[in-house]
Amino acid sequence: MKKSTICIFILFFVGYFISDAQIEKIGKISKDEFKIKNSEKYKESDAVVLFKERKTYYTADESIGWRLVTKVHERVLLKNKDGFEHATKKIKLFTKRNRDEKVSIKAYTYNLVNGKIKKTKLSRKDIFKERINKFWFEKKFTMPNLSEGSIVEWEYTITSPYIGNISDVIFQKTIPIKYFEAKIVIPEYFIFQYEASKYYSARVEINTRPRTISFSNKVRSGGGWVPTRTDVTREHIELNENVYKAKLTDIPAIKEEPYMNDIQNYIGKINFELSGVKYPNSVRKSFAKNWDDVTKTIYENSGFGSQLNKTKYFDEDLSGLVKPAHTQKQKINLILNFVKNKIKWNGLYGKYTDIGVKKAYNKGEGNVAEINLILTAMLRKAGLQANPILVSSEDHGIPIFPTLDGFNYVISGVEVLDDVILLDATEKYSQPDVLPRRAMNWMGRIIRKNGSSAEVDLFPKKYSLNHKRVNVKLSDNYEISGMLMETYLNSYALIFRNKYSDLSKDVIIKKIEEKYDGFLVKNVRVSNTNKLEKPLKVVAQFSLENTIEEVGDKIFFSPLLFLKDKENIFKSDIRHYPIYFGFPRMDRYEIVIDIPSSLSIEKIPKNTVYTLPDDLGSFSYNIKKENNKVFLIVETKINASIIPSIRYREIKDFFNKIVLKHDEKVILKSNK
């Protein structure tokens, strides 16, 4: 566009997007929409999205350039009080260097009162701004005057200077959507690639249409130093726009299922990624052609690669730290633990540094990138082959195509022979190859000094152990008391430490009693909480209630006692999503039950072994009686971190057999 000395910029959009008719107009609602509350189709839902409309387009202004505009219009029926949670809306907005995304909001609540629609407008004072972190804030509101059967409606428009950041088009929720429509209009100058989710996908229709931008220049001239005449000229810019459209009806609610990682990995959505820019009379600038291009671009960012070359700030600390180490393993553990204790994680994700590694080190606080790039640099300086690994956190989804925005997290990896040892110093209780769940999201990408990159499996290689030893004694009065000794290793230990380490003894006792049915704790001791190189151990002295069943002169009880599974966690007939166990695991129970001489052991269950195909898992049940004691060893193994949904029926049947086996009884007979 030409710039004049004095100009007034006026835009005219020919065949432009904002002239398209809306599905519905905000503030206009019919009584028929309230009737959907009684629809048989939605009887299992607490709320229903009657419709959702999403429009994204670009505007232009000579003084500020392009702006990205996203307009959302949504109407939701709240069937009952449990559905009221869907009357709260959070709009996430990005900010950087005082360049904020802006949002305007209109919203109403409708109630049918005595056959008439009563409308209540959302007040501006009920819209709150909350800071999430340095880069994100949100506008949040809860609709007023709610009652069972209310319909809530909002329309908001986000104007953003970040023209390459088209937010995901999300067309699935935890409640059903009756009708959804989206239209994304992109000028030909901006080259995007898109991908629809595979678990619930939308057919995207793509068309090209012309657009004309007209603007007028007002130029004053003549009369020497004093202008005496005003000339107005009009210029036109012709370009094409790519139009992406999607329409869906009767979209089912996405439902949380057992052993499912973050729902954002599976929810129905369309992702847009800016891959290049091509302005008239210029060469196309590409941002990401393949994964090597992506990693090269990230590595060359000043907040990434160059940060790894800075070492003077830690040289003195490192030289003293690694002196006692004689092996690679010792060096890794010493440096990992030092960084974890030296720098506190501020809760911010990111693949780039915020304040820089030196400042974060001296301050003792930093984001994910700062902490794990410091870790990588220290490992390299100590002579280890360490490199950063780009990760998409669990709640960020899975990058399907080469994309700069696909990664939002970075960990460290030490390459040893054909293996990569994974490290994350943001997690207080992490160990080598024991990552926090947020970082275990399928595959990461290691970036080496020579510029090469490769995929890295983020799922743990080590088995995690949950070993419980139980010694109990049954009294002549049929009371049970005993000792529970638990041992946790690897990811199981990490989970326990995060859950219980900061709790008082009384709170730990309460939580253990809530975990096991009929379990009354007399005393508990937890050891090795902060000694990460050792197994975490829990010892509890207890008594049991409601375990024995008396029928005549016989006594029945499950030898698994309080450890038995009462029901199969997998209940649905069909599963669309992978079964996410997170890490290979072994649950091993060793139980010894001392029977009084007043009773004899009449019958015990049979020994049993169940296996899953392709060595995915196994279950063994070994029981014997000896000297009026019952000895039981039960072992359940899952050998894969994640199992595809096509194996769901086998997994469900496997766990159903386990539940039935757990319920089998030892039968005792009175000798009196």
Image: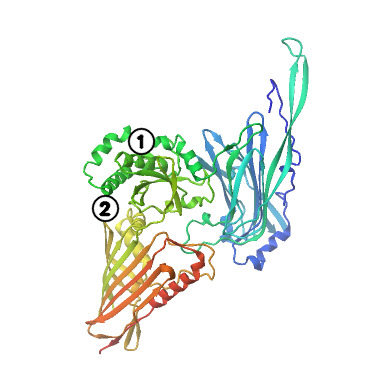
- What amino acid is found at the position of numbered circle 2 in the picture? Lys
Q: In this rendering, would 600 be left or right of 183?
A: left
| Residue 263 vertical placement versus 519 (above, below) | above
Q: Secondary structure at mark 2?
A: loop
Question: Residue 568, position in %: x, y?
Answer: 45, 71
Q: In this rendering, would 132 be left or right of 198?
A: left
| Residue 67 vertical placement versus 518 (above, below) | above
Q: Nearer the viewer, residue 240 or 88?
A: 240
Question: Residue 25, position in %: x, y?
Answer: 72, 49
| Residue 59 vertical placement versus 150 (above, below) | above
- Residue 134 seen anywhere in this rendered image of the structure: no
Q: How many marks?
A: 2
- What amino acid is found at the position of numbered circle 1 in the picture? Lys
Q: Quadrant of the C terminus?
A: bottom left
**Residue where numbered disc 1 is placed:** 363
Give the number of the disc on residue 531.
Answer: 2
Name which quarter of the figure residue 517 lies in.
bottom left
| Residue 127 vertical placement versus 491 (above, below) | above
Q: Nearer the viewer, residue 388 or 360?
A: 388
Name which quarter of the figure residue 5 lies in.
top right
Question: Residue 502, position in %: x, y?
Answer: 33, 53
